[in-house]
Image: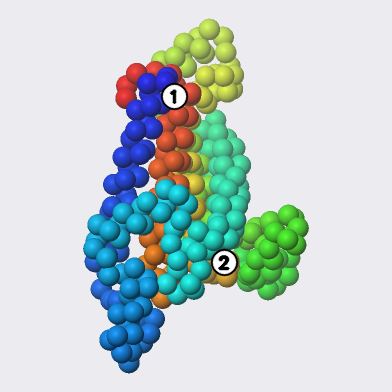
Amino acid sequence: MLRYFLKRLLSLALSLVVASIVIFLALEVVPGDPAAYMLGINAQEDTLAALREQLGLNGSLIERYAGWAGGMLHGDFGISYTYRTPVAEMIGERLWISLPLALFALCLSTVIAFPAGIWAASKRGSVVDVVVMGVTQLGVAIPNFWFAMLMVLVFAINLRWFSAGGFVGWDAGFLLAMKSLTLPAVALALPQASILARVMRSSLLDTLSEDFIRTARAKGLSKRQALWRHALRNALIPVLTIIGLQFSFLLAGAIIIENVFFLPGLGRLVFQSISARDLIVVESVVMLLVFAVIVVNFAVDMAYAIVDPRLRGRR
C-alpha cells in the first residue's frame, strides 16, 4: 500500500508541474498587453513601460514563470493587475463561497443519486426503473443554467422562499449563508445526480450479473441481501470515479451558475479577470482549480485501493 501511495504521489507532483507550465504558456500567447488594457489606447509609451516594469512584465519568459511558480509554493500568487491587491487574498475570500457550494451540491447529488440508482437497479424492467431512468434522462438533457433561471422564477420571484441572488456572507450566520447557496447548489446538483444515478444503476446491474453474485444466491441469500452485502461495494469503483470528476466540475465549472445567482465565487472571479485581462489572477485561479482536480483524482485512486485491494498491485 505504501508503494502504491508513493507512486500516485509522484504522479500527482509531475502532473502539477506539467499543468503549471501549460497554463502559463497558454496565457502568455493570448494577444494583447495588460498594461495597455489598463491605461487605455491613448497612454504614452513611457507610461506603459513604467507600468510593465511595475507589473513585472518585462522579464523573460523563464524568469516570469519561475517567479510565479516559486511564489505559489510559498502561498504568494502575486498582485492583481486590476485590483492591486494580493491574488491569494482575493482567492481566499471567494474560495469560501465556491468550495461550500461545490460540497453542498456534491452532497445533494450523492444523496439523490445513490437511492435512485440502487432502487432502479433492484427493480430492473419495472415501472419504477422506467420512471427513474426517464427522469434522469431529462435531468441530463436540461442545461443547468436554464434550470437555475426556472428555480429563480418559481422559488424566488413567485413563492419568495429564497432570494434571487447574492450571498449574505458567513457573518450573517451559517443557516442564512447556506440558504443563499441552496438554489445554486440544487441547480448544480440535479444534472450531476442524474448522471450519477445512471452510472450507479449500470454498474450495479453489471455486478449483479457476475458469477460470485449467482454463487451467493445459490448459497441461500435473497436478491436484496446479495445486493447490499456483495454487489454494492463492488459496484462503487466506477461511481467513485464519477464522484471525483463531479466535484472537480462543480468547483471549476460553476462560472455560469455563479453569474446567474450573482455569487462572488471563483467562477465569477475568473470571468471578471478574463474580461479585465488580469492574467495573474486567471493563471492563479486556474492553477488552483487544476490542483483541486488532481488532488481529488489522487483521493479517488486511494479510495479505489480501499474498496478493491486487488487494484494496488496493478499500478
- Count residues near mark 1 (Cα–Cα under 10 Å), then give few for <14, some for 14-19, many for 20+: some
Residue 200 seen from this side: yes
Against 3, residue 97 (above or below) is below
**In the rendered image of this protein, does residue 258 appear above or below residue 108?**
below
Res. 155 image quadrant: bottom right
| Residue 220 x %, y % | 56, 9
Q: Check disc 1 and give the amino acid type.
A: Ala
Which secondary structure, mark 2? loop
- Of circles 2 and 1, which is in front? 2
Marks 2 and 1, the one that precedes in the sequence = 2
Residue at 65% in and 58% down:
182
Question: Please, what is the three-letter code of the amino acid marked with disc 2?
Answer: Pro
Question: Relative to the observer, which residue lies in front, 175 or 94?
Answer: 94
Q: Is residue 34 left or right of residue 166?
A: left
> If the image is split into quadrants, where does the C terminus sit?
top left
In-front residue for pair 48/105: 48
Circle 2/circle 1 CB separation < 8 Å: no
Task: State left or right for residue 22 relative to residue 73.
Answer: left
* Distance CA(mark 2)–CA(mark 1): 37 Å
Residue furthest bottom in the image: 42
Query: Mark 2 highlights which residue?
Result: 264
Write down the residue under mark 1.
Answer: 305
Residue located 44% across and 14% down the image = 212
**Crowd band around label 2 with a 10 angstrom C-alpha radius: few (<14), some (14–19), many (20+):** some
Q: Residue at x 34, y 79 (%)?
A: 50
Residue 291 horizontal/vertical position (percent): 42, 47
